[in-house]
Amino acid sequence: MVEQICPVCEQQRVAKVQFFEEYRVEFCAQCGHGITLPVLTSTDLDRLYDERYFSELYEPCFAEKRYLQRKIRQEDHRLRLLGKHCSQGKVLDVGCGRGFFLYACKERYRPYGFDVSSNNKEYIEQQLGVELFTAEQELLKLSSAEGLFEAITFWHSLEHFTDPAATLGSFCSLLQDEGVLIIEVPIHDSIDAGMKGEAWEGWHIPYHRHHFSSRSLQQFLRDMGLDIVAAHSYHSGHVYERLKTRWYLQPFARSAAKLFGGGSMVVACRKAG
């Protein structure tokens, strides 16, 4: 249907098209990977990711200890996952947002953040005490001076990049051999996506340029030369919310929801030595 090549399996055959006002997502017939079209120019992307985007996406930051502790607790599951595969060293979080995951890492790791905007720089560096980079050249200088990173994380950020293969390849060059890469993305072939349709928050059109399926994500990472050591999806939010509406099922809602794959998938990999 189109000449757009799937970045995962390099096929051009389209299985289906889903429309979102002036945008559309075309899904590869072979691996299920979706691409938001039309492809945006760098000028278009700069306009999308203006200061208003970040102010609307993230809630206001506060320095109060209680607020910060609440945000850090929400990062516990990510910190535990990182700890299973990397015990210490330098950690780079790509697309770090407000930097709460990085702050949670401080007791055990040497954390650094990367984002396309400097909108959060003052808060992250002054309030959280974590260094934030907005240019890859700055990271190259850091790795040249202090060595490569032991771990790099992408928490719901890889899907924002126009060219995920080039992006991942560039950041993996900053990762030491046998280093850990953790990626978490929305999965469009999940129960949550199917039940919510266009209202599923995982689409986030036009900001999400790529839409991974559970198959395409793992195939993409293997094709990048990474060794997958762990992969799982979170519990289904749709199932959980439905069960909670019935008082007699509420005690079992979370356990039952874990039986169904949710709208996000996280994969831990190692860079081959």
Image: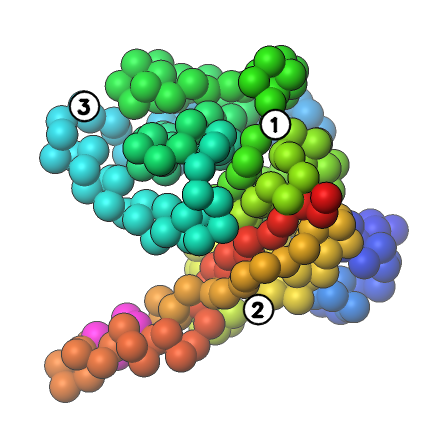
Q: What residue do we see at 57% from left, 31% from top?
A: 149
Q: From the image, tell me which residue sits under label 3.
A: 63
Question: Where is residue 122 shown, x and y percent of the image?
Answer: 35, 14
Label 2 Cα neighbours within 10 Å, binned few <14 / some 14-19 / many ≥20 = some
- Distance from disc 3 to disc 2, alpha carbons, whole Å, reads 39 Å
Q: What residue do we see at 72% from left, 56% from top?
A: 222
Q: From the image, tell me which residue sits under label 1.
A: 148
Label 3 Cα neighbours within 10 Å, binned few <14 / some 14-19 / many ≥20 = few
**96 or 88: nearer the viewer:** 88
Report the span colored magenta.
Answer: 240-244
Q: Nearer the viewer, mark 3 or mark 1?
A: 1
**Where, by quadrant of the figure, is residue 99 drawn?**
top left
Q: Earlier in the sequence, mark 3 or mark 2?
A: 3
Q: From the image, tell me which residue sits under label 2.
A: 189
The amino acid marked with disc number 3 is Ala
Q: Earlier in the sequence, mark 3 or mark 1?
A: 3
Question: Where is residue 132 shown, x and y percent of the image?
Answer: 45, 20
